Image (spheres, helix red, strand yellow):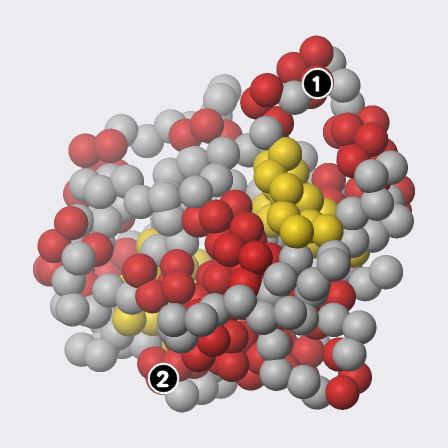
């Protein structure tokens, strides 16, 4: 089986082809009649051990729009609460013959571990601070539809990079596609070895977003900061919250992005989140299209015939 465990391992043509297919899926999602038979008869299980609004809803809608039978495993009321392990839970579901398993888990490597155990395609919907590949693809699609390209663009990823799988996947994808990536944030929230990932590191937000084409703001992941450095919200907003004065340092046509969930007044001011440069809601729309394209690429039995989704 083919899996999508991360952006690492995908090359330029892999990514470009997925984005082209996702563009086609956007058109389908905007039609009144959205349901296609591409994955008819196939079973998709969504297994989310961590909270999600966007990713889980869009994987469910994407599967349904492609005609798959979709089951959302309610982890909070499952036997996980009685102590069943990740692997035992996955093997139990595997015995019901799913064709695709979409997993989100707090541990880096959880999706790769499952992929070695189960007999179906596995998609990583976020594993710890490691990767969130479909998020990076939907971000790239959003940028490409606005800017017409990815190569040569300057993209500033700002905030809590240390805990962010979204940042990791975006850095790998954008580097692969020829964009220049700046990682912007306090040193306490920057992973060791960020420079080796092919990014510049800026501590001052104004410097980091100077002349940027795209600014991506990240949430402070307080739930992953236990025992570590936790900044005060007021101090953080003063230095790292994106408001009109700070955004003026970027290019006038700079896109403002946020993967969600947003904490308004912490990493982004409401006037910017809801302002004319924001494409945050469009990112959500692109999420459904990208997940349709990924599942079709992994599962469509006719995938070699270049059929539209
Ligand atoms: N961007 C993202 O992964 O959002 P959710 O946690 O709501 O799925």
Q: Is residue 264 above or below residue 14?
A: above
Q: Nearer the viewer, residue 19 or 30?
A: 30
Left or right side of 111 for 217: left
Residue in the image at 22% along x and 79% along y = 253
Q: In the displayed structure, would residue 220 be above or below residue 69? A: above
- In the picture of the structure, the residue carrying the numbered disc 1 is 79
Quadrant that contains the N terminus: bottom right
Q: Which of the two marks, 1 or 2, is nearer to us in this view?
A: 1
Residue identifier under label 2:
147
The answer to whether the beta carbon of the residue marked 2 is less than 8 Å from any atom of ligand 1 is no
Q: Nearer the viewer, residue 95 or 240?
A: 95
> Could you tell me how far apart the alpha carbons at marks 1 and 2 are, in whole angstroms?
47 Å
Quick check: marks 1 and 2 in contact, CB under 8 Å?
no
Residue at point 67%, 71% (across, down)? 38
Q: For label 1, count other residues whose C-alpha is less than 10 Å away and answer few (under 14), some (14-19) or many (20+).
A: few
Query: Which circle marks residue 61 in the picture?
Result: none
SS class, disc 2? helix
């Amino acid at each position: 089986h083919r899996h999508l465990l991360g952006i690492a391992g995908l090359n330029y043509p892999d990514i470009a082809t997925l984005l082209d297919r996702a563009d086609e899926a956007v058109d389908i999602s905007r039609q009144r009649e959205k349901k296609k038979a591409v994955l008819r008869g196939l079973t998709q299980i969504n297994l989310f051990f961590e909270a999600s609004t966007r990713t889980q809803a869009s994987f469910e809608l994407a599967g349904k729009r492609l005609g798959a039978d979709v089951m959302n495993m309610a982890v909070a009321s499952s036997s996980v609460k009685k102590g069943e392990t990740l692997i035992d839970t996955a093997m139990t579901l595997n015995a019901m013959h799913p064709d695709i398993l979409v997993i989100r888990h707090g541990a880096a490597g959880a999706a790769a571990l499952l992929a070695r155990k189960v007999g179906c395609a596995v998609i990583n919907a976020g594993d710890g601070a490691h990767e969130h590949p479909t998020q990076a693809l939907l971000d790239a699609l959003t940028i490409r539809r606005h800017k017409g390209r990815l190569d040569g663009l300057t993209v500033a990823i700002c905030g809590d990079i240390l805990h962010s799988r979204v940042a990791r996947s975006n850095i790998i994808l954008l580097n692969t596609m020829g964009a220049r990536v700046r990682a912007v944030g306090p040193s306490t929230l920057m992973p060791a070895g960020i420079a080796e990932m092919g990014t510049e590191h800026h501590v001052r937000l104004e410097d980091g977003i100077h002349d940027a084409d795209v600014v991506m703001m990240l949430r402070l992941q307080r739930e992953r900061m236990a025992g570590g450095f936790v900044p005060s919200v007021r101090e953080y907003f003063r230095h790292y919250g994106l408001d009109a004065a700070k955004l003026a340092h970027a290019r006038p046509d700079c896109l403002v992005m946020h993967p969600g969930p947003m904490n308004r007044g912490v990493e982004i001011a409401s006037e910017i989140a809801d302002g004319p440069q924001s494409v945050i809601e469009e990112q959500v729309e692109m999420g459904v299209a990208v997940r349709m394209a990924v599942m079709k690429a992994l599962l469509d039995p006719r995938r070699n015939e270049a059929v539209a989704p």
